Amino acid sequence: MSFSLSDLFFVLVIFQLVFISVFLFTNRKGKKLSNGLLGSFFLVIGLNLIDNFLLLKNYYFSYPSLALWSLWIILLLGPLIYLYTQSVLFKDFIMTSRKWIQI
């Protein structure tokens, strides 16, 4: 498997997204809920890019049962960014199961 400059850039972006999401999950300052939602948003983007990278590198030809596992996870991007903006805009925002139903 050979890596080109674009592959290196792809892996660097994935690493940064995962690193930022881990940082936001472990950060104790600021709004914990907002940090968790933004960290989840970045993690979903990172997982989607990992799946696309594996697809581009033909990894799934050897293991077809693992192919395209991130197709369903991309559907979380809209609700996560909506809930993140709600948590930033409103001081008294509390995460409940009803919030997920309203989306």
Image (tube, rainbow, N blue to C red):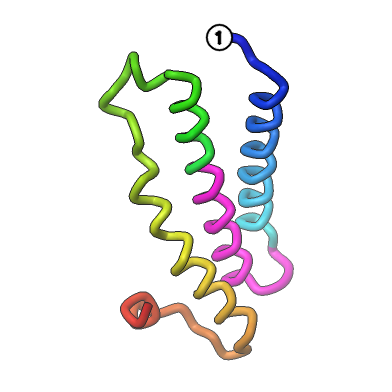
User: Residue 17 occupies which quadrant of the picture?
Assistant: top right
The percent coordinates of residue 33 (x first, y second) are 57, 71
Q: How crowded is mark 1: few (under 14 residues within 10 Å), some or many (20 or more)?
A: few
Task: From the viewer's side, name the closer residue of 59 and 20.
Answer: 59
Q: What residue type is labelled 1?
A: Met
User: Residue 4 occupies which quadrant of the picture?
Assistant: top right
Give the tally of numbered discs: 1
Q: In what quadrant of the picture does the C terminus appear?
A: bottom left
Chain part drawn in magenta: 28-47
**Extreme residue toward the left, this view:** 65
* 78 is higher (above) or lower (below) than 95: above
User: Residue 31 occupies which quadrant of the picture?
Assistant: bottom right
Task: From the viewer's side, name the closer residue of 80 and 26.
Answer: 80
| Left or right of residue 103: residue 23 | right
* 97 is higher (above) or lower (below) than 74: below
| Residue drawn at x 64%, y 55% as measured from the top left | 26
* 56 is higher (above) or lower (below) than 84: above
The percent coordinates of residue 69 (x first, y second) are 34, 39
| Residue drawn at x 36%, y 75% as measured from the top left | 100
Specify whether residue 83 is painted magenta.
no
The percent coordinates of residue 1 (x first, y second) are 55, 9
Check disc 1 and report the residue beneath it.
Answer: 1
Q: Is mark 1 on a helix, strand or loop?
A: loop
The percent coordinates of residue 41 (x first, y second) are 54, 58
Determine the main secondary structure of the stretch shown in magenta: helix
Task: From the viewer's side, name the closer residue of 41 and 49.
Answer: 49
* 31 is higher (above) or lower (below) than 2: below
Task: From the viewer's side, name the closer residue of 92 and 48.
Answer: 48
| Residue drawn at x 49%, y 83% as measured from the top left | 94
| Left or right of residue 66: residue 58 | right
Specify whether residue 40 is painted magenta.
yes
